[in-house]
Image (tube, helix red, strand yellow):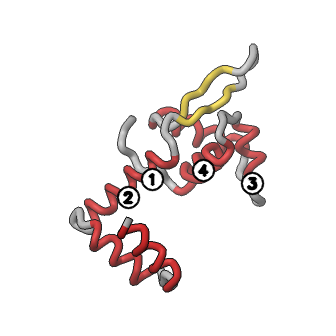
């Protein structure tokens, strides 16, 4: 698999598939979309792109032209890889700088900060 970042549209499709914990057809992915839903052909095109990028594997369903698409990477693996890349490129590889940014920019509550500190201490 190439280390290509997902576009917003690709990420939407991957999240829909990851959330279902199983392979889905184009029609099943489309069912999961909220309104306004994209065109069937748009979703099909993005799923083929995701297959070419190595994020999905297509398996023929029955005797027709229908395919079920299965994730080849977990959400956790993708998230880990993406956060590492962000840390490397935007924060000079510093986890401290990355965490400092989130604490400042995300308005983390005192309760959440306390919970994070407890996790760090463990």
Give above or below for 93 relative to 106: above
Q: Where is mark 4, residue-wise?
A: 15
Quadrant the C terminus occupies: bottom left
Q: Earlier in the sequence, mark 2 or mark 4?
A: 4
At x 78% / y 46%, what residue is drawn?
Answer: 31
Q: How many marks?
A: 4
Q: Are marks 1 and 2 in contact (CB under 8 Å)?
A: yes
Report helix, strand or loop for mark 4: helix
Q: Which mark is residue 79?
A: 1
- Taking the view exactly as shown, the residue that stands out farthest to the top is 63
Q: Which residue is disc 2 drawn over? A: 83
Please tell me which residue is depicted at 70% across the width and 43% down the height of the picture. 29
Q: Is residue 69 rendered to the left or right of residue 62?
A: left
Q: Position of residue 59 (x, y in %)?
A: 62, 23
What SS does tag 2 mark? helix
When asked about the image quadrant of residue 56, the answer is top right
Q: Confirm or deny contact between disc 4 and disc 3 (CB under 8 A).
A: no
| For discs 1 and 4, the disc positioned in front in the rendered view | 1
Please report whichever mark, 3 or 2, sits nearer to the chain's N-terminal start: 3
Q: Which numbered disc covers residue 37? A: 3
């Amino acid at each position: 698999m190439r280390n290509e970042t997902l576009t917003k549209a690709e990420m939407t499709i991957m999240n829909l598939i990851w959330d279902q914990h199983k392979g889905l057809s184009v029609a099943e992915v489309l069912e999961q979309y909220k309104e306004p839903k994209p065109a069937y052909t748009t979703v099909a095109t993005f799923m083929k792109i995701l297959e070419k990028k190595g994020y999905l594997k297509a398996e023929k369903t029955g005797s027709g032209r229908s395919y079920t698409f299965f994730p080849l990477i977990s959400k956790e693996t993708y998230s880990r890889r993406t956060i590492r890349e962000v840390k490397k490129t935007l924060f000079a590889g510093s986890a401290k700088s990355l965490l400092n940014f989130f604490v400042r920019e995300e308005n983390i509550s005192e309760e959440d900060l306390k919970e994070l500190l407890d996790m760090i201490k463990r």
